[in-house]
Image: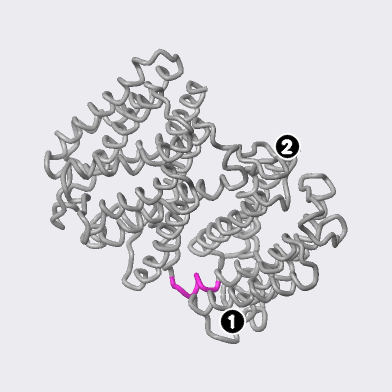
Amino acid sequence: MGEAYLLAIVGSIAGIHGVARRWSPWTKRTVVLPVATAISIAFLLVDTLGLARGWFATPASGTTLALPGAGPLGRGFPIEEPLLLFGITSLAVLIADLVGRGRVHTSSPLGLRDAVSVAMIGALTGATIGALMIGAEYTVASAALAGSGVALAWPLLVADRGSQASFTIFLILTLIFDNLLCASGLLTYPSGPRSGVLLGYMPLEDLLYAVGLVGAALRLRAEVMRGQGSAWRIFLASRPISWINTGLPFLAGLIAAGAGERLGGWLLAPLLWWGAGYNLFLYGINDLYDRASDAKNPRKGGAEGALLRVRDLPSLRVALWIAGVLPAIVMWLTIPAPAGLAPLVAVGLATLYSAPWFARARSIPILDSVVSSAHFLLPPVAGLLFASALNDDWLAPLIALALWGGASHALGAVQDVDADRRTGIRTIATLFGPTRTAWIVVLTYVAAALPLAVQMEPLARLAAVIPLLSAVSAAPLVRGASSYRSARAAWRRFLWMNAPLGAAASIILLESWR
């Protein structure tokens, strides 16, 4: 059943994309992707709370794979949930675009500052009503979500036809499909933390949850459209293609430490931070202080980094605090040391690398590659620090990862050497020149394979092939390092190989550590 559920979600997302391409020219990825991603992350955190508190669970038969942390109901977090949230949020945006023809009409001005105040008032009102009427924990929480969603979307629900249609259709579809999910057993609910009121097979709380989600999505859609591309550029600044490069190693380290079940239902919160929040801070602060260099760099303005405008900077600074600094402080206060210190160290190193009012290691040759390597070494170390005792077997893979990260940074520096020289930024590539740096890259990749190749464990030795493949991919750069086209080709090969090789390395090393 879990495989069928996953295929249904993937098929639905593909269908939403097809409808948008065929019948809704007003639906833009610059709006859909930031809105769907932000709402999905926010409600994944809500689901994390629900799993940890035992509000709901997905049976083992209802999911293809569950994360190791299990809540009070004995179930981990289903991997289908992020796709489901992304899909239904995209659907809400698509319906509003189709009916409203890509426009937003409101009875009152919009603004993020006002939205925060309205959301807090709505959440407090909803929670109060839920507490007075029923008092069950999940009911109070879902009522707070619904109150917040209605308060956020109210200016749109009064005057905007697209939002009105999306809100109504979304709730009707929720009633239909949640009843099917509950009747099939894909979702289960204990009676304790909820009201017990059913709408067919589904609990009332599911509808309240949906009201909160669609209200927040419609308001965020309006804000993103009003921002004239700021949200898209900030989204690009977080390098979404790199989220898996930090999130998966953190999860691998956590599993290797045997700490997944110890975190229980809360596991998803730090995983989301090391995947999305950390990357937004790491790359966002870099783009904030590299605007002059990025403006002269032809590879910027897409998946490899945003070309920020002056109007984007206040929102980006707020995002850096909300997504990066504040969660790191919360984890420092709630997660026992030394694991709880890792997010703060990560924020500190990212600031050290980019901020001119700190050290700006970004423009100190050799140190730039060392600090950059630490950025990608920290996530698995953060996971391993949850272990009750450190294991010597972890040392060789970590050394290999550190060398691999330094080589990868130097590879990227080769393609940026002209833009960096024009703006006076010194890097490892401007110090040694493109050709010598290319040799350093290839030799460092080879050196990364050595600690793995000498291990007794066969799977660890197999993992030595991965940095060697990176060396082979970078080898043509030695002859054409002075050519921007050759440097770009080498970097593109790195990007295409990065995710599958990283996933393979994580799986191989996890198996070897068991």
Q: For the N terminus, which image quadrant?
A: top right
The front one of 365 and 359 is: 359
Q: How is the image coloured?
A: one colour
Would you name the residue on which mark 1 appears?
105
Who's the residue at 80% across and 63% down the image? 204
Residue 495 horizontal/vertical position (percent): 38, 40
Would you name the residue on which mark 2 appears?
60
Residue 367 horizontal/vertical position (percent): 20, 43
Residue 244 horizontal/vertical position (percent): 47, 43
- Label 2 sits on a secondary structure element that is helix
The answer for how far apart the CA atoms under marks 1 and 2 are is 45 Å
The front one of 162 and 459 is: 459
Occupied quadrant, residue 466: top left
- Label 1 sits on a secondary structure element that is loop
Magenta stretch containing residue 293, yes or no?
Answer: no
Disc 2 crowd rating (10 Å Cα; few below 14, some 14-19, many 20+) is some
Magenta part of the chain: 222-228
Residue 22 horizontal/vertical position (percent): 61, 59
Who's the residue at 24% across and 29% down the image? 444
Taken as a whole, is the magenta stretch helix, strand or loop? Answer: helix
Q: Amino acid at mark 2?
A: Ala
Q: Amino acid at mark 1?
A: His
